[in-house]
């Protein structure tokens, strides 16, 4: 049994190198190359691996703690991402990945068809999540008898190829048996236990990551009609934009904004799944290249079969991503054009408002000039009246000028004086307004 945090057993004491302080992430970086070793596997042997999609590592640790308690050993550390536990005549290996965890039991050959008491997946095992992948791998000595195992596979999808320079054969039909496990048979012609372990891990990872990569296809198939509807709606809106008698730009812009919001919501929800599918498919291709298969006449190789069946699904996912990106750009361009129209309409409205304000200001100026003229006449009338009263008093006091004559002579002087005072006041207000604006 092993219980190590990721980075290896010496990660905690790797704080210095020749007495110099080391980077805090150096242990993890160094230990990553040892994080997934190929366990040696003797021939004959059987392997069952289940991959569970889990919400958090705490759920896995809870199941592991229960299994460890049943075996009378210490549970794994809370930060551990790998754990190995002896179970019956075999070994249970647990590993935590980004969005799933794998539980691999390796034991004697010819296990019963389904969970039994000698595997950890029998009664009392609590699944940490839903199963996304299940593999049953049988390793046999290559003999005339074991060659007949090929008859138990579906010939329509049978993949049979030589690996490890012809010293082993890998056989599968990628179909599930009665327990829902994908059956794989490896025929060994003299490999070491280390090479058998490495080959077994590659084959299991191909099936596991192939399944995870294909998770993007159902999502792509769901999004395809929605993108098609958005494309048709955008075509209709842009066609309406070309018409001379188009409806209001604000309404068109609101429709485009709603389409863009729907598209971006779909793109955000599918971003992780499509990215994960690309990454998983890349791992599958790497593992297939590492097999270095040699074709057996009359049979498909793993690489050829998966290229025909998986590559179209990956192209579909990429196509949906590209359509989302293209639609986002088109919607952005259409929205920009409509915003330009809206800005032009607003500027036109502002221009009309300014013209109306200018017309109103001219009318106010004319009215003001008219009022000023009337005010000059009214004030002059009152001034002449005052002069008349003053002249009448002077005439009674013996002044030789008659009151009517004095009033008549004061009329032009009063009008000129009042007009001059009004112009001075208006000129002063104009200077103060100009100074404020300056």
Image (cartoon, grey):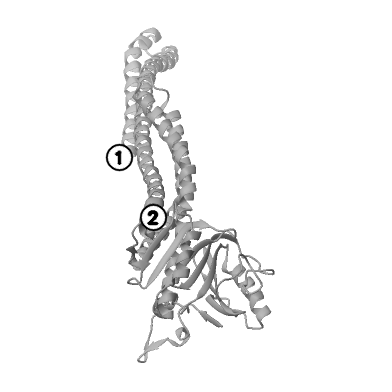
For image coordinates 45% across by 45% down, the residue present is 264
Left or right: residue 66 compared with residue 47? right
Disc 1 to disc 2: CB gap under 8 Å: no
Give the SS element for disc 1.
loop
Give the image quarter of residue 298. Answer: bottom left
Where 263 sits versus 234, above or below? below
Q: Residue placed at 33% from the left, 31% from the top? A: 430
Which residue, as the protein is rendered here, is positioned at the far front? 144
Instruction: Name the residue nearer the viewer: 63 or 183.
Output: 183
* x, y percent for residue 36: 45, 75
Q: Evaluate whether residue 24 shows in this view.
A: no
Q: Residues within 10 Å of mark 1 (few under 14, many from 20)?
A: few
329 sits left or right of 106 in the view? left
Q: Which residue is mark 1?
A: 438
Residue pictured at 35% horizontal, 62% vertical? 296
Sequence order check, earlier mark of 1 and 2? 2
Q: Is residue 286 placed above or below 239 in the rendered structure?
A: below
Q: Which residue in the structure is indicated by mark 2?
A: 305
Is 139 in front, or is 286? 139
Image quadrant where one finds the N terminus: bottom right
Dividing the picture into quadrants, the one containing residue 364 is top left
Q: Residue furthest bottom?
A: 19
Q: On screen, 245 above or below 18?
A: above
Where's residue 142, x and y in %? 43, 72
Measured in 3D between alpha carbons, the distance from the residue under mark 1 to the one under mark 2, in whole angstroms, is 83 Å
Q: Circle 2 — which element?
A: helix
If the image is split into quadrants, where does the C terminus sit?
Answer: top left
Nearest to the eye among marks 1 and 2: give it. 2
In the image, residue 17 sits, relative to residue 415, either above or below, namely below
Q: Which mark is residue 332?
A: none
Asked whether the viewer can see residue 9, the reply is: yes
């Amino acid at each position: 049994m092993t219980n190590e945090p990721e980075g290896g057993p010496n990660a905690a004491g790797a704080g210095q190198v020749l007495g110099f302080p080391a980077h805090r992430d150096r242990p993890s970086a160094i230990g990553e190359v040892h994080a997934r070793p190929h366990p040696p596997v003797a021939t004959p042997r059987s392997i069952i691996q289940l991959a569970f999609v889990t919400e958090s590592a705490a759920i896995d640790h809870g199941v592991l703690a229960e299994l460890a308690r049943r075996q009378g050993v210490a549970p794994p550390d809370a930060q551990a991402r790998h754990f190995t536990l002896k179970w019956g005549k075999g070994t249970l290996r647990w590993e935590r990945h980004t969005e799933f965890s794998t539980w691999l039991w390796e034991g004697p050959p010819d296990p019963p068809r389904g969970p039994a008491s000698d595997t950890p997946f029998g009664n009392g095992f609590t699944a940490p999540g839903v199963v996304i992948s299940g593999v049953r791998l049988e390793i046999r000595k290559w003999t005339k008898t074991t060659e007949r195992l090929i008859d138990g596979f579906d010939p329509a999808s049978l993949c049979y190829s030589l690996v490890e320079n012809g010293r082993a054969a890998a056989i599968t039909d990628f179909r599930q048996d009665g327990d829902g496990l994908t059956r794989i048979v490896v025929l060994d012609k003299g490999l070491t236990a280390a090479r058998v372990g490495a080959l077994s891990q590659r084959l299991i990872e191909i099936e596991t990551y192939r399944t995870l990569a294909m998770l993007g296809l159902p999502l792509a198939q769901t999004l395809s009609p929605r993108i098609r509807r958005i494309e048709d709606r955008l075509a209709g809106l842009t066609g309406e934009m070309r018409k001379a008698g188009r409806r209001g730009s604000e309404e068109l812009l609101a429709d485009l904004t709603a389409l863009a919001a729907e598209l971006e919501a779909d793109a955000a929800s599918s971003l992780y799944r499509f990215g994960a599918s690309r990454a998983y498919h890349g791992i599958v291709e790497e593992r297939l290249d590492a097999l270095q298969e040699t074709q057996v006449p009359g049979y498909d190789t793993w690489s050829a079969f998966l290229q025909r069946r998986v590559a179209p699904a990956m192209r579909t996912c990429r196509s949906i991503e590209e359509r989302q990106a293209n639609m986002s750009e088109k919607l952005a361009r259409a929205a920009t054009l409509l915003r330009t129209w809206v800005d032009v309409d607003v500027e036109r409205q502002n221009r009309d408002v300014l013209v109306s304000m200018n017309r109103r200001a001219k009318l106010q100026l004319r009215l003001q000039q008219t009022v000023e003229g009337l005010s000059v006449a009214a004030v002059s009338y009152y001034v002449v009246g005052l002069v008349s009263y003053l002249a009448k008093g002077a005439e009674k006091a013996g002044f030789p000028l008659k009151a009517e004559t004095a009033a008549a002579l004061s009329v032009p002087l009063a009008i000129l004086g009042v007009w001059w005072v009004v112009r001075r006041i208006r000129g002063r207000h104009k200077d103060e307004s100009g100074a404020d604006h300056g």
